[in-house]
Image (tube, rainbow, N blue to C red):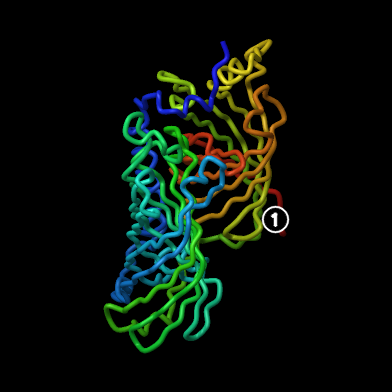
Amino acid sequence: MKRSLSSDFSGTLIFRKGKVGSCILILLLIIVFMYIFTGNAEAQGGFHYKYRTSNLVLEGRFYYGWTLDHHIEMTPFKRHYPSYEISLLKATYGRARWEYMYNYPLVGVSCWYSDLGNTNTLGSAIAVFPFINFPLIDKKGFNFYFRLGVGLGYLTRPYDRYDNYKNIAIGSHINGAVNLLLEARWRFGRRFMASAGLGWMHFSNGAIKLPNYGLNIPCAHASLAFRLTRENVYLKRKLMPELYPFEFDNRKYLNFDLNAAFAVKDMQATLGAGNSFVVVTVFGNMMWPVSYKSRFGFGLDVSYDGSDETLLALRDIEPNHKINLVKTGLNAAYELEFSRMSIMLNMGSYLSGLDKSDGYVYEKLALRVGITESLFGSLTLKAHYAKADFVAFGIGYRVKLKYYRNR
């Protein structure tokens, strides 16, 4: 007998799993991002510089935005409302090589709060996240930055069968929080700075627990900052990074990596109690270096999603063989490095796989951390048209293939 997916949102289902998985996911995100924030991975050995921890700045920021109705189901939650943030930040000095390569960005940590329009359904939200401000324009008295922050979010009113069945946006208290900003920053006086610009706040649990349409909050913002100490005049004397022997011997390499990962999808909100599925995926990327920071290339994905067979059965479609459930895809890839960590972006299209209910196009965002020179761990979010499908934990191996050396 056919079952209606939409009817399962009526509040008759119980969430029993997912809290542990959400906690693990968010803790890993924070650990990985703090790996960048601290800069310890590639700090120069025995480095001591008495001014490196000075120049602390306390900043308060005001946002005004709205809940984006990126799906028709999100329309009832559309509201305009303010948000508030307090941050502690400082300048970098070249303690790690990536700081020099990215023109000495600002790093910091923020606490963000909003009542999300004072709706009883969504409740309120709080987020704590480390961030990096990448300088795009650096002139005397004026700077233009792009900020990236990733951390932990807590929502007070997630979906609940009895008490909050109308909240189909978020199914868990604990979520990932991503903050993106474009900001122009001005200095006035010796201790004050002001900034203004546009921003984006996002909450999601990566589909570890459904429902998970996520919250997207575009906004305008303004801030006022105060230096807690006098400005460090040595900021103008940036420290140059350590160079390694034979680093510039004109060798060029292709990077080939092979990855294996797994995920668990909790679909009890749409399919009923007990419907959790395992996802297994294997993928590879061939990457060409375009600078010391980034690479372009292409990738190939092979994955098996245990939920596909159930979703097909609901539409009275029966695969002839299990192999028809395996999805393959070809994608374009981009990798950006920060010391021993990198961010990988992929966008591609499926070549095979019987279930196409999510469409033919997919996106992936991966955080990778080097364990050894060749071995790395990964945390990969896969999505379809910006809607999260699953978060996979994996391990990969990278091989460098030399293709050029001018003798």
- Left or right of residue 99: residue 34: left
In the foreground, 239 or 154: 154
Where's residue 178, x and y in %?
Answer: 45, 53
**Picture layout, residue 204 above or below residue 94:** above
Residue 142 appears anywhere in the view = yes
- Left or right of residue 256: residue 78: left
Name the residue carrying label 1: 405
In the foreground, 120 or 196: 120
- Left or right of residue 349: residue 26: left
Amino acid bearing label 1: Arg
Report how many numbered discs are placed on residues in the image.
Answer: 1
Image quarter where the N terminus lies is top right
In the foreground, 71 or 280: 71
In the foreground, 142 or 267: 267
Residue at the bottom extreme of this rendering:
189
Where's residue 225, x and y in %?
Answer: 35, 76
Where's residue 77, x and y in %?
Answer: 46, 47
Categorize mark 1 by other alpha carbons within 10 Å: few (<14), some (14-19), many (20+): few
Q: Quadrant of residue 159?
A: top left
- What residue appears at the point 54 percent right and 45 percent down from the top-left corner? 365
Image quarter where the C terminus lies is bottom right
- What residue appears at the point 45 percent right and 46 percent down from the top-left corner? 369
**Picture layout, residue 322 above or below residue 149:** above
Residue 264 appears anywhere in the view = no
Where's residue 4, x and y in %?
Answer: 55, 21
- What residue appears at the point 66 percent right and 35 percent down from the top-left corner? 300
Q: Quadrant of residue 166?
A: top left
User: Which secondary structure, mark 1?
Assistant: strand
